[in-house]
Image (spheres, rainbow, N blue to C red):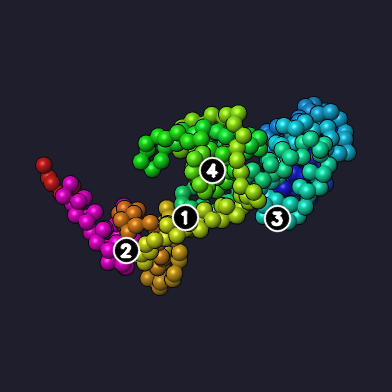
Amino acid sequence: MRADRLVATVLLLQARSRVTARELAQELEVSVATARRDLEALSGAGIPIYPQPGRGGGWALLGGARTDLSGLSSPEAQALFLLLGPAAAIDPAAKSALRKLVRALPETFRADAEAAASAVVVDPASWGRAGRAQPAFVETLQTAVVQRRVVRIRYAGWSKAETDYLVSPWGLVDKNEVWYLIGGVEGRDGERTFRVDRMRAVTPTEEPATRPDGFDLGAAWERVMTEVASERTAVAAVAVVASPLLGYLRSQFGQDCEVLEHLPDGRTRVRLSAPTGALIARRLAGWGAFAEVLSPPSVREELAAIADQLTAIYSSTS
């Protein structure tokens, strides 16, 4: 588990004046490339770890050797716990390590460190196509979650119309590199989920954010996934696709493509799900004879209507 390695890396650097990536790899029984990536991740997150060039160099923790976390500043502690927190949500050993690290911090830093550890959930499963680069506002939103400050968000919904919201940010979720914010909107009850890549502007305020007692980001995300899964699978179609192209179909439908049976004629029978039959038909329209919908009739009719439209446009010889 990467969280365990990151904790061990920080403690090892605190116990020694410096360490090379090769030495770290030997200590943690990982590859040199993995050790180097971990060091770079910690450094990039704001932990004061720096490479030392030249003969006898390596990586050093600014301030020299230490045996506890008391030398970290509050922002540095928050950066460390933002890195480690997501793994602790799903791994008991990492959660135990975080609790021990919290107790090693100066008392004045503990609340912010604990808030940082619970600020992000990572969900590696995809809802469809692959993710993309981290949106510009993630770091600003992370800070607002940790500091419990209201943010003003300009948000473009499905209709592309932009609306301003005052939001108490409760936590961020990284789902296959697509980021979501869960929070409460001022003047409304309940929680709301925002896609960060649809945010057009994010402005922190000095207004304290409200947060429900006992709020659990992991449990809140489970509720979101249950609701979305219900909407995403409202319509299911059974189709057959040329087996060599199954991977492309899966990349298009993500987890909404379920393999039912591999047929002896070189095709695969699948179940495809989407909010509407029309959406399934639109996604399959370009597949031509490589994919055939068997049921329901409504999706076949949608495909036939699309074919008629294309014929009307392209059959003219003029």
Q: Residues within 10 Å of mark 4 (few under 14, many from 20)?
A: many
Q: Residue 184 shows which numbered tag?
A: 4
Check residue 290 for magenta coloring.
Answer: yes
Instruction: Specify the quadrant that holds the C terminus.
Output: top left
Identity of the residue furthest to the top in this view: 54
Name the residue tied to disc 2: 292
Provide the secondary structure element on which disc 4 rests: strand
Name the residue tied to disc 1: 228
As rendered, which of 41 and 178 lies closer to the eye?
178
Q: Is residue 124 among the parts visible in the rendering?
A: no
**Of label 1 and label 2, which has the lower sequence position?**
1
Q: Which residue corresponds to the image point at 50% horizontal and 47% vertical from the top-left?
A: 189
Q: Position of residue 259 (x, y in %)?
A: 45, 66
**Of label 4 and label 3, which has the lower sequence position?**
3
Q: Amino acid at mark 2?
A: Glu
Name the residue tied to disc 3: 91
Q: Nearer the viewer, mark 1 or mark 2?
A: 1
